Image (cartoon, helix red, strand yellow):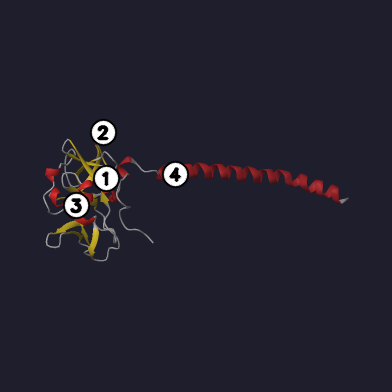
Amino acid sequence: MDKDNTKKIADSACAPCCMQRRDAMKAAIAVTVMLGGGLRGAQASEPADLPPQPGDRLVRMDEEGPPQPLKAADIPLASKPVRALPFAATDALVRDGSRLGRVILMRFDPASLDEETRARSADGVLAYSAVCTHQGCEVSEWDANGGAMFCFCHFSKFDPLKAGAVTAGPAGRALPWLPLKSENGELVVAGAFSSVPGVRKG
């Protein structure tokens, strides 16, 4: 038998096998695409997982009962930070799905704020991420003598009157600030965090 005939017979015998392999590959690709789409959908943020959005109100983190939007008068003057969560009032949704959306609020006499700080405040109220930039613990305390917010884990301190600058401790970067405005007396988110909240990897 000549070589051409041998090749034809071999190709003919292989054809069903090759077709099966091609079909299997196509099916695998189709499944991969479907799974990829499903995974992308699963990874998409739910509304409650989103960080504070422009227009959100702020509500106390530990409040029981229906959420009540905070007003400047609800924040003690130069005292322990008030822990808050963003609240989408139109959807009656508290954005509590991610701790990176947590906020701390402090109030100062507006006359004591420099122009830049006053521009991102609402009636003297300043907002910062509640998540320490060192190892992700929570910034929750106030050092009145040192004029700094601080984290109990490793005692990193941040100056609320200087854009959250680090004044002591191991934190390597400032605490992200959140611009606010006032609408009908309520504290309203006016924009995004100044930088990504939490620990910056790498």
Residue 92 image position (x, y, % from top left) = 24, 35
Q: Which residue is mark 4?
A: 40
Residue for point 15% across, 38% down:
185
Does dot 1 land on a helix, a strand or a loop? Answer: loop
Q: How many numbered dots are placed on residues in this image?
A: 4
Give me the C-alpha separation between circle 2 and circle 4. 27 Å
Q: Amino acid at mark 4?
A: Arg
Q: Which residue is mark 2?
A: 90
- Compared to residue 65, the image places residue 175 above or below, namely below
- Count neighbours of disc 3 (C-alpha within 10 A) and say few if under 14, some if 14 to 19, many if 20 or more: few
| Camera-nearest label, 3 or 2 | 3
Q: Is residue 87 left or right of residue 123?
A: right
Residue 166 image position (x, y, % from top left) = 24, 61
Residue 86 image position (x, y, % from top left) = 25, 43
Q: Is residue 71 left or right of residue 174?
A: left
- Count neighbours of disc 1 (C-alpha within 10 A) and say few if under 14, some if 14 to 19, many if 20 or more: some
- Compared to residue 144, the image places residue 93 above or below, namely above
Q: Contact (CB < 8 A) between labels 3 and 1?
A: no
Q: Earlier in the sequence, mark 3 or mark 1?
A: 1
Q: Amino acid at mark 3?
A: Asp
